[in-house]
Amino acid sequence: MSRNVAIHKVVASAATAVLLATLFPGSGLAQSPAAATAPAAVALNKFGLPDFGDLVESVGPAVVNISVASESQRPSAEMLSPDDPFYDFLRRFGVPFPGGPGQGERGPRISRGIGSGFIISDDGYVLTNAHVVSEGKVEVTVRLIDKREFKAEVIGTDARTDIALLKIDAKGLPTVKTADADRTRVGEWVVAMGSPFGFDNTVTAGIISAKARRLQSENYVPFIQTDVAINPGNSGGPLFNLEGEVIGINSQIYSRSGGFMGISFAIPIDVALNIKNQLIEFGRVQRGKLGITIQTVDRDLAQTFGLAEPTGALVARVEPDSAADKAGLKAGDVVLGVDGVKVGESADLPRIIGDKRPDTAVKLEIWRDGARQIIDARLDEMPSGSTALASGPGRGDAADTLGLTGRSLTPDEASRFGVPGGVLVEGATGPAAQFGIQPGDLILAINNQRISNAAEFRTLVERSGKRFALLVQRGDSRIFVPIRIE
């Protein structure tokens, strides 16, 4: 799993109740509040703690292991050139090496990965994470708990939410039930199943630590944070409530070591089901787009604009000829709500707009010149493939501290700008803004190495250390922008 996720500590209240009941028999203290309201799907053991055995037996057959073989071109850096002094030495002694005789000098490289998933319908639809199956040309194999294996077709992926839909050729399969993730509560017990490090059908348990958690590199997912133990290979596996219903898909971890550190993030199941339905119906995911760059409204800005509290999304820039431009939005407006749904913070707005279909008419509640106004807008369509390039604190590497968000150019945009490819900057903070990168810039190269998409951008940034130069096209001119990350 290239993106990571958690368990940690178990609440001690039930154990305390057992101790009190032992010390004071007959007092009624043996039944803790948690025990009294435990869902029927999970039994209690003799200590009054949840016993997940029945739940696991019930849902386990619908949880699958996913193995992926991906094919990519072998980088030239891995090849030993015939001009290298070691080339002839290794050849003479018959030592195999990349680029040597019989070693497929420029052939493809096969890499293998593992992940998890679950069967969502008995005719073979399987949900998992996009990052499990979306790198290069892939061959995906789904293995059930009864050891049956099926070659899977990737129906579609959505990078923004990290959801992928697979299809296997089988009927009458065991399936999971789903629940409304919004009705879950912080502190509620949850159970994860998956294949960490390839260990199939591994079960871990914990609690929901927080809801609607925003990650700086993700604009479209209100993550469920848990302390359930998640490790590489768990990606795409289900997160169950105590009724045995899926409430989320395990997707990421916060980690400084690459392994579990007690903080996991799951994609709410309603987000995943929306993606699944669109992929089946349209073959792609459609999202609405306003065409604005936004920033957070802090307390100082709220006071400056005359707002009673720091809420909403401040419009920093309006794209020409966009839905926002046609509706009359201006830089300096604060979007407070969409169709009656409150925009509590700036991160809410992309998700609310993105959940709506293109060409949908919406009513925007805005704050302008010290008063509330209602503006009508009709949404454009968000280009596919937009992704976070390098935004905010994350793993601590150069890409995660650069402070850029953007997306790959579409073929039509590349043709219009007269470039073979590149990355369109949608937002700049931190070092990127400090050294002059602006929304609307096109990034064409890093250290004179051309880039064609966002994935190449991130890879090259992470390889470049703390200092590098970006070739930027701004309007009709091109400039090199030196970047230094402290």
Image (cartoon, grey):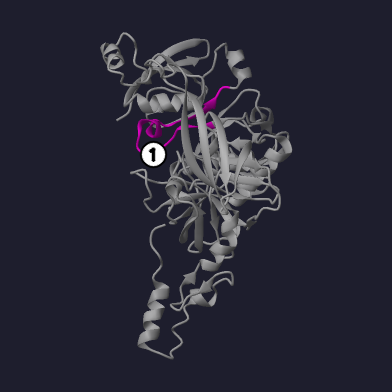
Q: Is residue 147 left or right of residue 468?
A: right
The location of residue 15, given as percent across then percent down, is: 39, 75
Closer-to-camera residue (8/382): 8
Q: Give the residue drawn at x 52%, y 10%.
A: 476
Q: Tell me if residue 65 is in the magenta stretch.
A: no
Closer-to-camera residue (43/172): 172
| Quadrant of res 275 | top right
User: What range of the chain is rendered magenta?
Assistant: 387-409
Residue 269 visible somewhere in the drawing: yes
Q: Give the residue drawn at x 36%, y 51%.
A: 261
Closer-to-camera residue (396/479): 396
Give the amino acid at mark 1.
Answer: Pro
Q: Residue furthest bottom?
A: 26
Residue 335 visible somewhere in the drawing: no
The location of residue 433, given as percent across then percent down, is: 41, 27
The location of residue 68, given as percent across then percent down, is: 52, 37
| Quadrant of res 229 | bottom left
As displayed, is residue 420 above or below residue 342? Answer: above
**Residue under numbered circle 1:** 393
